[in-house]
Image: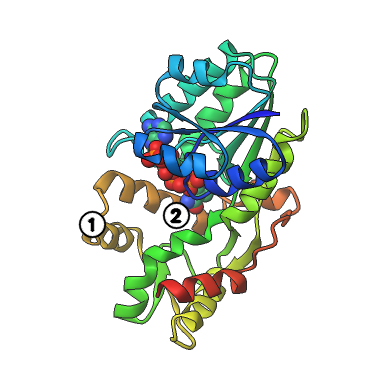
Amino acid sequence: MKIIVTGSLGNTGKLLTSILVAAGHQVTVISSNADRQQDIEALGATAAIGSLSDAAFLAGAFAGADAVYAMTPPGMGGSNIVANNTRAGEALATAIQQARVPRVVVLSSVGADLSSGNGPIAALYNIEHLYNKVPGTAFTYLRAGYFYLNFYADIPLIKGQGFMGGNYPANTVLPLVHPRDIAAAAAEELQQPSGKKVRYVVSDVRTAADVAKVLGQAAGKADLPWVEFTDEQSLQGMTQAGLPEEIAGLYTEMGAAFRSGKLQADFEQNGQPVSGKVKLEDFAKEFAEKV
Ligand SMILES: NC(=O)c1ccc[n+]([C@@H]2O[C@H](COP(=O)([O-])OP(=O)(O)OC[C@H]3O[C@@H](n4cnc5c(N)ncnc54)[C@H](OP(=O)(O)O)[C@@H]3O)[C@@H](O)[C@H]2O)c1
């Protein structure tokens, strides 16, 4: 099959490309950075250099494709994040329609069933709805859990303050995922002519307290506590750590949605499907290497 991977050699793109090349597919990887060409070719794929906001470039890259892995990078500019990410989805939808791509597997998120109050995930709600209007293409939305990798940002807090925390309590149940499990699910779906419209991709379901305990242990801090912050403390902590105000505000909104339970409600109503293999304790081994 001729398969196009957006997302370059990022967290999911690189792993997915390796799986698809090993399965004998003809893979093209889209990157915005010409310097990435050699690394893409070293994986056995072809590079297409251009922007995910450029519908004409994308339509050219998608011509004759059997399937596309469509993701929108998290930071499409430092401001108007939801609008900018939605615009990348618009460009992708236009290109998918123009190139008449039969099969598209989309990286979405737990919480993308909500139009607002879910932080940056609102863009993925918009994007799922844009894709739903494209005729003749079989879409599958991979609604991924919260990436384990996000916890790398907590290393300074763990080392400096001796706790982990967020604006949700220790007993909050979090759907967590490793990019390896996303790549495996995406590869499986891309090789099928159609699939379920929404597929949750979650590796483990654990409380925030568990996350602190297990990752604390990996960091050499036994019984690391999870501390609940107020929304104000959360926002302030992120901006003090150098995050721009807008994205810090969106992450705070997302944390509040975890606290209320509405972010994970649809996943839970669907029976909390855990198809991934990488458990929190497995990720803790990778985490230990970065601390
Ligand atoms: N973090 C979470 O907890 C979470 C949970 C659920 C879903 N998600 C979703 O997962 C997605 C992120 O996936 P990921 O972690 O695989 O991505 P990633 O590794 O952060 O980024 C993928 C790559 O996209 C490329 N890129 C950036 N801007 C581009 C542009 N304008 N045009 C073309 N390529 C561009 C970059 O590579 P080049 O420099 O080579 O272009 C980047 O390395 C987001 O949509 C996010 O909402 C995240």
Quarter of the picture holding the N terminus: top right
Nearest the viewer among 114 and 94 is: 94
Relative to 140, say whether 180 is above or below.
below
Q: Position of residue 132 (x, y in %)?
A: 63, 22
Relative horizontal placement of residue 177, taking residue 116 as reference (left or right):
right
Q: Is mark 1 within 8 Å of ligand 1?
A: no
> Which one is closest to the eye, mark 2 or mark 1?
1
| Res 116 label | none
At x 36%, y 82%, the residue is 162
At x 38%, y 33%, the residue is 32
Q: Amino acid at mark 2?
A: Ala
Q: Position of residue 252 (x, y in %)?
A: 38, 53
Crowd rating for badge 1 (residues with CA inside 10 Å; few <14, some 14–19, many 20+): few
Crowd rating for badge 2 (residues with CA inside 10 Å; few <14, some 14–19, many 20+): many
Q: Mark 2 = which residue?
A: 256
Q: Mark 1 = which residue?
A: 242
Helix, strand or loop at label 1? It is loop
Relative to 33, say whether 154 is above or below.
below
